[in-house]
Image (spheres, grey):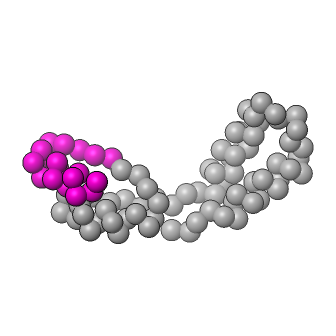
Amino acid sequence: MLDSLRQILEKSTNTRVFLTGRQHIKSEVERHLSTRATILSLKPINDDIVGYIRMSLSKDRFRDAIDAGLEAEIIKSIAENIPET
């Protein structure tokens, strides 16, 4: 797919593409699109992720089944597994 994308970008110089992916994809994108890509690495901010989780849990249709202890456990479990970049 990345080779095909490279060919499209080489033939259509006005074409712009936005890709997102995990850190391990970066080397593949660099290898296939090195001359045609600008690569930005973004690091998630833990507080933003925790805020998003809280908001999502507050909107859950089974919100009554989630007490404060379970909410804290969910947030802790997810926050501990946020990959460092």
Task: Identify the magenta region.
Answer: 1-18
43 within the magenta span? no
Image quadrant containing the N terminus: bottom left
- The x, y position of residue 20, in whole percent, is 41, 52
Seen in the picture, residue 62 relative to 79 is either above or below; the reply is above
> Which residue does the image show at 19% across and 43% down from the upper left?
15
- Numbered marks: total: 0
Instruction: Tell me if 18 is positioned left or right of 74 in this view.
Output: left
Where is residue 72? Give x, y as percent. Answer: 82, 53
As drawn, 42 above or below 54: below
Q: Residue at x 86, y 50 (%)?
A: 70
Q: Is residue 59 left or right of residue 35?
A: right
Tell me residue 8's x, y (percent): 16, 48
Residues 62 and 69: in front is 62
Above or below, comparing residue 81 to residue 75 in the picture: below
Q: Say left or right for 37 vs 27.
A: left
Q: Residue furthest top?
A: 61
Q: What residue is at 33 percent from the left and 47 percent from the top?
A: 18
7 relative position to 37: left or right: left
Q: Where does the image place residue 35, in percent across and percent down from the top left?
A: 18, 63
| Residue 24, quarter of the rendered image | bottom left
Query: Where 21 falls versus 63 (above or below)?
Result: below
At a point 58% along the width and 57% down the height, the residue shown is 45
